Amino acid sequence: MWTGCADQLRAALLERLWAGDRFVARSCETGHTWSTDSLLYLMPIVLGRELPALVRTRLAERIGEHLTEHGLATERPTSGLYEDDGYWRGPIWAPSTVLIEDGLRRAGHIDLADEISVRFRALCERSGFAENFDARTGAGLRDRAYTWTASAYLILAAAHVERHRRQTPKGIPPRT
């Protein structure tokens, strides 16, 4: 029953919100669609291999456009809507980073997932566990000791160590 429901939801997502090269939002009242350069429109990558290959590839390309020196900007820095300290209009956030990194990995875009992990972990090591981070400078914003950021760091770091433990002969420490 649950598999059937999941299949129906995925089919509806693709039929109603995939516009051939991107996901869009749709008004329930008018059916009018729109899209921006927000990372939110790329969140369906969490479905990983459950998405068609073309959709996975296009999402990965667009996610790559959000990748700054410090991590995934929630709005592309080149967007007219970007704000250095605009809630979800630019800063790097831990929850979206972990969700997208995992989705990319499960979608087969391992190199991009690895790069996102490396950059986010380095950001936390430099700037601490802030609620969010300036995507251009890496400076911590808001609360400087946020548990979801610390948790995201620990999830990504543990997964990194485990992947390298499985790939590396005994006695050789993992690369960062």
Image: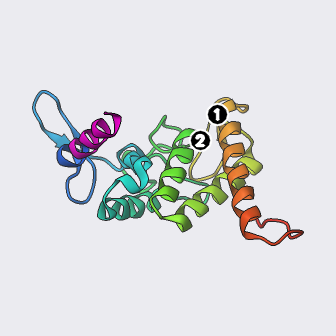
Between residue 141 and residue 117, name the one nearer to us.
Answer: 117
Label 2, label 1: how far apart the Cα atoms are: 7 Å
**In this picture, residue 163 sits left or right of residue 18:** right
**In this picture, residue 167 sits left or right of residue 77:** right
Between residue 61 and residue 56, name the one nearer to us.
Answer: 56
Mark closer to the chain start, 2 or 1: 2
Q: Picture quarter containing residue 145?
A: top right
Q: Residue at x 54, y 53 (%)?
A: 101
Q: Which type of secondary structure does the marked residue at label 1 adopt? A: helix
Between residue 142 and residue 16, name the one nearer to us.
Answer: 16
Residue 128 placement (x, y as % from top left): 75, 42
Indicate the amino acid at tag 2.
Ala
- The local crowd at label 2, few if under 14, some if 14 to 19, many if 20 or more residues have their Cα within 10 Å, is many
In the rendered image, the vertical position of residue 110 relative to residue 131, given as above or below: below
The quadrant the C terminus occupies is bottom right
Determine which residue is flagged by label 1. Answer: 148
Q: Which type of secondary structure does the marked residue at label 2 adopt? A: helix
6 falls in the magenta region? yes
**Residues marked 2 and 1 touching at CB (< 8 Å):** yes
Magenta-colored span: 1-12
Residue 35 placement (x, y as % from top left): 26, 46
Residue 32 placement (x, y as % from top left): 13, 38
Residue 130 placement (x, y as % from top left): 68, 36
Whether residue 38 can be seen here: no
- The local crowd at label 1, few if under 14, some if 14 to 19, many if 20 or more residues have their Cα within 10 Å, is some
In the rendered image, the vertical position of residue 169 relative to residue 151, given as above or below: below
Q: Picture quarter containing residue 68?
A: bottom right
Q: Picture quarter containing residue 115?
A: bottom right
61 falls in the magenta region? no
Q: Main secondary structure of the magenta part?
A: helix
The quadrant the N terminus occupies is top left
Determine which residue is flagged by label 2. Answer: 94
